[in-house]
């Protein structure tokens, strides 16, 4: 090839074509992403290290979700994107970095708001931006959980976690997102009350598992 033949090749977006192999890699990545989230929570609840939500943390968590699956793991999407089944059209790719910065600024400047409000806001706004080629839902749910835990000051115990419950039944989650989208589009204001209510219910279920475990003793046979 001569220097005059120089040309570029686009990266292959999907690195795994086989659906079964992809499913196995996604399952592995979910665990790695959760481990990274726990590290972030534990390192951020130290009194000497005040927490600030930064785009780099969001990008990192997406990278863990898509590692080995997509060439765009941990990178903002380069083009427009559509959300199937939703009336909302996410902002253009050129606006994504600014929108993510604004999301972080909202969380950081409103840190005195309730943990549920901040988690609900992240859940909605990051979905609204849809900053990634893939893994937007997984990344959004884990970032919301990170913010919730850090704002509370501890890793929320119990299982299944809020993100796991949403992944198991997404209809209420989608409905809460659509409600927040509709209010923002019609009135240009933030209303994540429906998402807050949903997260409150899911959090109660997660914490209830701790109470059940505390009250059970399989090895105890009575006296």
Image: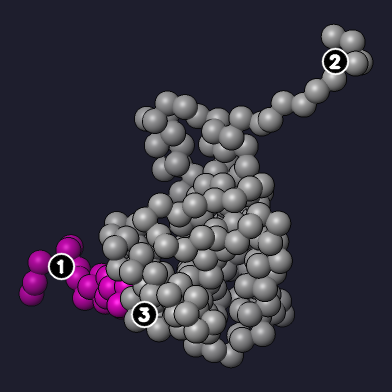
* Rendered position, 125 above or below 66: below
Q: Quadrant of residue 21?
A: top left
What is the image's colouring? one colour
Q: Classify mark 2: residues with Cα within 10 Å, few (<14), some (14-19) or many (20+).
A: few
Name which residue lies at 46% across and 49% down: 30
For disc 1, the marked residue is 220
Q: Which mark is residue 194?
A: 3
Dot 2: what SS?
A: helix
Q: Is residue 118 above or below residue 14?
A: below
Q: Nearer the viewer, residue 26 or 36?
A: 26
**Observer able to see residue 118:** yes
Q: Position of residue 4 (x, y in %)?
A: 90, 16
Q: Nearer the viewer, mark 1 or mark 2?
A: 2
Indicate left or right for 50 with 185 as reference.
right
Label 1 and label 2: CA atoms lie apart by: 77 Å
Q: Which residues are magenta?
A: 199-223
Q: Secondary structure at mark 1?
A: loop
Query: Which residue is found at the position 54% from the left and 89% from the top?
Result: 113
Q: Earlier in the sequence, mark 1 or mark 3?
A: 3
Residue 96: % across, % down: 66, 60
Name, please, the residue furthest toward the right: 3
Quadrant containing the N terminus is top right
109 horizontally vs 87: left or right:
right
Q: Position of residue 193 (x, y in %)?
A: 40, 84
Using the rendered view, name the quadrant where residue 83 is placed. Answer: bottom left
Q: Quadrant of the C terminus?
A: bottom left
Residue that numbered label 2 is attached to: 5
User: Which of the two labelled residues, at mark 1 and mark 2, occupies the earlier sequence position?
Assistant: 2
Label 3 Cα crowd, 10 Å radius (few <14 / some 14-19 / many 20+): some
């Amino acid at each position: 090839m001569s220097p005059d033949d120089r040309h570029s090749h686009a990266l292959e977006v999907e690195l795994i074509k086989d659906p079964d192999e992809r499913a196995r890699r996604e399952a592995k990545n979910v665990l790695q992403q959760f481990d990274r989230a726990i590290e972030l929570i534990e390192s951020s609840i130290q009194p000497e290290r005040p927490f600030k939500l930064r785009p780099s943390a969001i990008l990192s968590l997406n990278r863990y979700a898509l590692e080995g699956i997509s060439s765009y793991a941990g990178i903002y999407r380069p083009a427009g994107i559509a959300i199937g089944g939703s009336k909302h059209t996410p902002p253009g790719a050129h606006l994504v970095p600014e929108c993510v910065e604004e999301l972080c600024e909202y969380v950081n400047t409103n840190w005195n708001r309730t943990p549920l409000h901040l988690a609900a806001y992240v859940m909605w706004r990051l979905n609204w931006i849809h900053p990634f080629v893939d893994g937007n839902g997984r990344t959004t749910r884990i970032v919301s959980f990170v913010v919730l835990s850090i704002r509370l000051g501890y890793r929320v115990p119990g299982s299944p976690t809020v993100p796991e419950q949403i992944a198991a039944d997404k209809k209420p989650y989608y409905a809460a997102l659509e409600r927040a989208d509709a209010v923002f589009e019609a009135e240009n204001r933030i209303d994540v009350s429906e998402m807050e209510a949903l997260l409150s219910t899911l959090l109660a279920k997660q914490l209830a598992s701790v109470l059940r475990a505390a009250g059970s003793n399989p090895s105890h046979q009575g006296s």
